[in-house]
Image: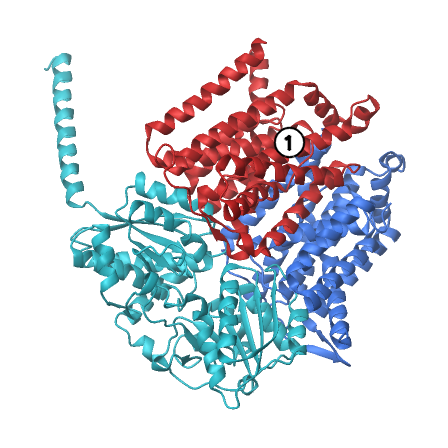
């Protein structure tokens, strides 16, 4: 005896959540999935984006998503700078794995603690016209607070997909992840390409962070909830596949939502990671991996 | 073998010094702070066996540590087991976890192992939160045994932790200098090449994850008696993850001395900072120092010392 | 013309004399101004710092107030405190340093059940009087006689959060029948839920939903929908600040309208939450300890305290109104200070005996301790948010928006029932 409208609502809520999770994971999907750089600091950039949106919202009343878009160039440059440091210190010397990971871990901490020092640990929220309202389709209610981030997430995924498939830089990024030598022979500089890609990945965090603070209040340590989710989704979806990331994000969102509705929310987060661990054991290439 | 005898002598001397300090009953604060520092020596050494020697970065240190602590809590609640049993049990359970994670990510690249350890912490913490017998999310108060040696239970725990630190460091040193250590180094530098050369990489990986897990669990087992109140947030604290990483990185990952140096330096600095400046700055400084070391002095203090020595000679 | 060796001699004599004078003088001054040190750890960072920092400010205000009046026992009061980072593992080390290195004369606890828990064994071992700041049922296991808790939970801490809520529900006519309860997987909410279950049985309600969620939940709509599907009359929520906000927003989006909603939602009383949620709070019946209603504003000294606190709060970066923990933190040290003065010394046992047997006048009213160090009579309030318009802070400064419904002797208004009526 399943309550159909409860099920429908749970699935829809999960889909919306999935769209948001996709936005959150895009950065990792590019940086880790394509460039093979395990950027553990990505969640910190996400929260940084949330705080940027919060500051703009509380000072100027700017819509958070607008802030997210406005700040993408800033975050792009930030990402490019971080990559240059990373490249100069690690990749060039060929010592990326251990030290690179540690570098990003330290960076994560520095960003989180800086936010804590500057903003304190009170929960920060944003105001926007559409928060608190919802629309009804038959028996299914959709909150704007979730719908808008989901749509933005889908738009981001589509934009990136087109960028990677259709533009020169995009294809160069795909190429650099597959064959660096061939790329050089084509006349492109791999370091330059990777800088662009890393910058885009961090810029994605800016927008995703704005979406996050729209959905729920944030504090500096909120990043820790997302470390696992981001990587779980990227790995599950398959390294190097943007579309795969979206599918994995939606799967995770729906599972979390169904668990929360029918079984009890306590285990939903753990179940998601359980799935990741099983996926790693059974099919590490992920659903759509190369 | 003079080498082994010398190691044994040094180890015994350190333990004896620990007992002596304990029996002197100096300012009790020394034992509390000292316990934490020696605990970190064990944690850093354990992490380094897997991270420094084998090149597999474990972000899930809190999972192993907390599992050791909660195994102890379970045994205290059920049969009031004595401390040595708690330590052994905590170590074994965490060793099993290490074995399990190693086996799960056996044929994958190192970075997947790291991600799996991230996920591990969350899954384990959720399980503990939902397990009422060991306190669940509300935590559990643990009463220390009465009439301890040295008069105060924490002083006793201090000597126990000194002993554990000596054992851990001895084990690390032994591994480092044996064929296992050489195999792990080969594994770290290039796993495929090592396999081609006939190094039993899979078995070595499992060995490293298991022994690292064992030592982390051992470090966690006395924790309930130290803190007398165990709850998931502090047992699974991310600080353990960062410190387990930072201490070997700062000290130097290639040798057993590195984690010891890192633990003593960073651990003391943190203990000092807790009772002087605000701890947000404390964390900030750890992050900055970590990044600085990893960028500028990737071989840690050991590396710096070696470079200096190299220049003068 | 003096010879060099003579100059050296004179210099040495002068230096010696000067040093001696200084030493003597500082010894005299130090002895005369020998301060009384009160030591504690406090959550200045980490999850509970949103309350820990205001608490510290309140204690510092008390120290300044008492020093203006000449200190305690004629000696100035000095605070020695460290950040416990909301991590119980730091507590043993911090308090050992306070007692054995800083040599404090008195200790008080940090904020929160989890930070008080590891402190009790230490206090027991050293036979100290321990004032506890907002911990639930810490002393039930130990039953230490020298522990006193300033949170007005009363002799039955576990039901203290929910009792007013369910009693108000039971009084309504017709009596509501069904209860849905939900809470976060964390210390305070879990305790509140245990109490709630007991009370549901006592009042004869029927439970139709009883689940918990992990604090890192992003979206509460599935949970709220599941609750709505059971069509409950009463919805009891035990949550921490982010989930309180999340649940409330989801409730509005899903259209959850039981007859009475609220209960144990921590965080709704924080100024940042009140000003950002605004009218979404209308109708919620929630636990609280203090409200800017006439009965509370009339208590001796509270107005002066709030004026001082609110003046300093902005610069300190803490809750600007201070209507939750700060008055109680101040009252805690008031009790301790009054006991020290009354026993004319720093004998821990005498102080504890005095506190146990006397009633105190504080800025939160009369305080008397009973079983296990809890208040002899519980005073957890049930408040209802009413007629909030927009998101300005000024409407929350005075009476009228957070009405006290229970207990009856502190009532300042009537409940708007059912919940939906308050939303209009």
| Colour red maps to chain | B
Q: Residue C83 at x, y = what percent?
A: 42, 48
Residue in view at x 18 percent, y 41 percent: C30
| Colour cyan maps to chain | C
Q: Residue A263 at x, y = what percent?
A: 69, 65
Above or below, comparing residue A218 to residue B262 in the picture: below
Q: Residues within 10 Å of mark 1 (few under 14, many from 20)?
A: many
Q: Is residue C4 left or right of residue C221?
A: left
Above or below, comparing residue B15 to residue A15 in the picture: above
| Colour blue maps to chain | A
Q: Is residue C342 left or right of residue B2?
A: left
Instruction: Tell me the subunit letter for badge 1.
Output: B
The residue sitting at the bottom extreme is C173
Q: Is residue C198 left or right of residue A96?
A: left
The quadrant where residue A69 appears = bottom right
Identify which residue, B141 or A29, lies in the foreground: B141
Label total for image: 1
The quadrant where residue A176 appears = top right
Q: What is the quadrant of the C terminus of chain C in the image?
A: bottom right
Q: Is residue B291 visible?
A: no
Residue in view at x 55 percent, y 71 percent: C237
Residue in view at x 68 percent, y 59 percent: A268
Secondary structure under tag 1 reads helix
Residue hosting label 1: B211
């Amino acid at each position: 005896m399943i309550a159909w409208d409860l099920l429908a609502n749970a699935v829809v809520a999960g889909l919306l959540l999935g769209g948001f999770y996709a936005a959150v994971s895009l950065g990792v999907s590019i940086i880790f999935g394509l460039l093979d750089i395990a950027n553990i600091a990505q969640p910190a950039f996400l929260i940084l984006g949330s705080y940027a949106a919060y500051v703009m919202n509380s000072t100027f009343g700017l819509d958070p998503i607008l802030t997210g878009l406005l700040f993408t160039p800033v975050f792009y440059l930030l990402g490019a700078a971080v990559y240059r440091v990373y490249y100069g210190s690690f990749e060039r010397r060929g010592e990326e794995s251990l030290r690179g990971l540690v570098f990003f871990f330290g960076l994560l901490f520095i960003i989180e603690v800086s936010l804590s020092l500057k903003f304190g640990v009170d929960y920060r929220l944003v105001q926007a016209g559409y928060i608190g309202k919802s629309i009804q389709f038959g028996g299914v209610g959709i909150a704007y607070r979730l719908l808008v981030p989901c749509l933005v997430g889908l738009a981001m995924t589509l934009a990136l997909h087109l960028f990677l498939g259709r533009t020169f830089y995009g294809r160069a990024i795909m190429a650099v992840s597959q064959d660096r030598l061939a790329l050089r022979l084509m006349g492109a500089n791999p370091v330059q390409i990777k800088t662009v890609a890393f910058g885009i990945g961090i810029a994605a965090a800016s927008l995703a962070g704005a979406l996050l603070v729209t959905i729920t209040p944030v504090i500096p340590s909120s990043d820790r909830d997302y470390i696992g989710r981001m990587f779980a989704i990227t790995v599950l979806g398959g390294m190097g596949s943007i579309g795969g990331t979206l599918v994995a994000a939606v799967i995770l969102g729906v599972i979390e939502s169904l668990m929360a509705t029918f079984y009890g929310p306590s285990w939903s987060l753990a179940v998601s990671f359980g799935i990741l661990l099983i996926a790693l054991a059974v099919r590490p290439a992920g659903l759509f991996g190369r | 073998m003079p080498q082994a005898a010398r190691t044994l002598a040094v180890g015994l001397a350190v333990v004896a010094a620990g007992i002596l300090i304990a029996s002197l009953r100096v300012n009790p604060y020394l034992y509390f702070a000292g316990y934490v520092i020696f605990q970190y020596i064990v944690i850093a050494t354990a992490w380094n066996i897997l991270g420094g020697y084998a090149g597999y970065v474990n972000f899930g240190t809190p999972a192993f540590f907390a599992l050791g602590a909660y195994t102890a809590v379970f045994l205290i609640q059920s049969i009031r087991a004595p401390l040595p049993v708690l330590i052994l049990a905590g170590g074994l359970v965490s060793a099993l976890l290490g074995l399990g994670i190693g086996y799960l990510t056996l044929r994958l690249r190192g970075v997947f192992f790291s991600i799996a350890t991230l996920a591990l912490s969350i899954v384990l913490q959720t399980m503990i939160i939902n397990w009422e017998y060991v306190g669940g999310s509300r935590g559990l108060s643990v009463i220390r045994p009465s009439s301890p040696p040295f008069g105060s239970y924490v002083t006793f725990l201090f000597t126990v932790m000194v002993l554990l630190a000596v054992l851990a460091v001895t084990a690390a040193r032994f591994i480092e200098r044996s064929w296992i250590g050489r195999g792990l180094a080969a594994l770290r530098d290039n796993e495929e090449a090592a396999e081609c050369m006939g190094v039993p990489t899979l078995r070595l990986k499992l060995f490293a994850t298991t022994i690292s897990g064992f030592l982390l669990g051992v470090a966690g087992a006395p924790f309930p008696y130290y803190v007398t109140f165990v709850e998931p947030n502090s047992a699974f604290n991310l600080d353990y993850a960062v410190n387990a990483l930072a201490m070997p990185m700062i000290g130097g990952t290639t040798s057993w001395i590195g984690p010891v140096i890192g633990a003593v330096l960073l651990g003391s600095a943190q203990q000092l900072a807790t009772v002087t400046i605000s701890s947000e700055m404390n964390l900030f400084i750890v992050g900055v120092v970590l990044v600085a070391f990893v960028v500028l002095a990737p071989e840690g203090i050991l590396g710096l010392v070696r470079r200096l020595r190299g220049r003068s000679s | 013309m003096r010879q060099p060796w003579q100059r050296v001699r004179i210099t040495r004599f002068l230096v010696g004399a000067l040093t001696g004078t200084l030493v003597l003088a500082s010894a005299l001054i130090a002895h005369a101004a020998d301060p009384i040190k009160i030591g504690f750890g406090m959550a200045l960072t980490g999850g509970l710092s949103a309350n820990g920092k205001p608490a510290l400010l309140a204690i510092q205000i008390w120290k300044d107030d008492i020093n203006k009046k000449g200190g305690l026992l004629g000696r100035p009061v000095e605070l020695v405190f460290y950040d416990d980072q909301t991590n119980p593992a730091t507590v043993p080390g911090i308090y050992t340093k306070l007692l054995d290195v800083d040599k404090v004369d008195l200790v008080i606890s940090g904020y929160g059940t989890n930070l008080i828990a590891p402190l009790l064994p230490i206090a027991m071992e050293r036979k100290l009087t321990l004032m506890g700041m907002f911990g639930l049922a810490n002393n039930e296991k130990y039953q230490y006689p020298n522990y006193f808790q300033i949170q007005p939970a009363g002799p039955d801490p576990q039901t203290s959060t929910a009792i007013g809520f369910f009693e108000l529900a039971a009084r309504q006519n017709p009596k509501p029948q069904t209860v849905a309860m939900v809470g976060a997987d964390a210390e305070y909410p879990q305790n509140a839920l245990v109490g709630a279950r007991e009370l549901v049985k006592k009042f004869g309600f029927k439970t139709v939903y009883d689940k918990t969620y992990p604090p890192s939940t992003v979206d509460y709509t599935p949970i709220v929908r599941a609750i709505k599907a059971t069509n409950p009359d009463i919805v009891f929520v035990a949550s921490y600040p982010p989930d309180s906000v999340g649940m409330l927003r989801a409730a509005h989006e899903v259209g959850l309208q039981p007859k009475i909603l609220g209960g144990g939602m921590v965080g709704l009383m924080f100024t940042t939450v009140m000003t950002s949620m605004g009218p979404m709070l209308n109708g919620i019946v929630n636990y609280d300890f203090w409200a800017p209603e006439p009965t509370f504003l009339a208590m001796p000294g509270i107005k002066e305290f709030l004026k001082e606190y609110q003046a300093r709060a902005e610069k300190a970066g803490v809750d600007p109104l201070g209507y939750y923990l700060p008055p109680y933190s101040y009252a805690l040290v008031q009790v301790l200070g009054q006991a020290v003065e009354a026993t004319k010394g720093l004998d821990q046992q005498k102080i504890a005996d005095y506190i146990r047997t006397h009633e105190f006048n504080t800025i939160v009213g009369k305080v008397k301790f009973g079983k296990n160090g809890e208040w002899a009579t519980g005073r957890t309030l049930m408040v209802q948010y009413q007629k909030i318009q927009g998101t300005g802070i000024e409407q929350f400064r005075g009476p009228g928006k957070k009405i006290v419904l229970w207990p009856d002797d502190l009532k300042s208004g009537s409940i708007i029932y059912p919940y939906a009526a308050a939303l209009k």
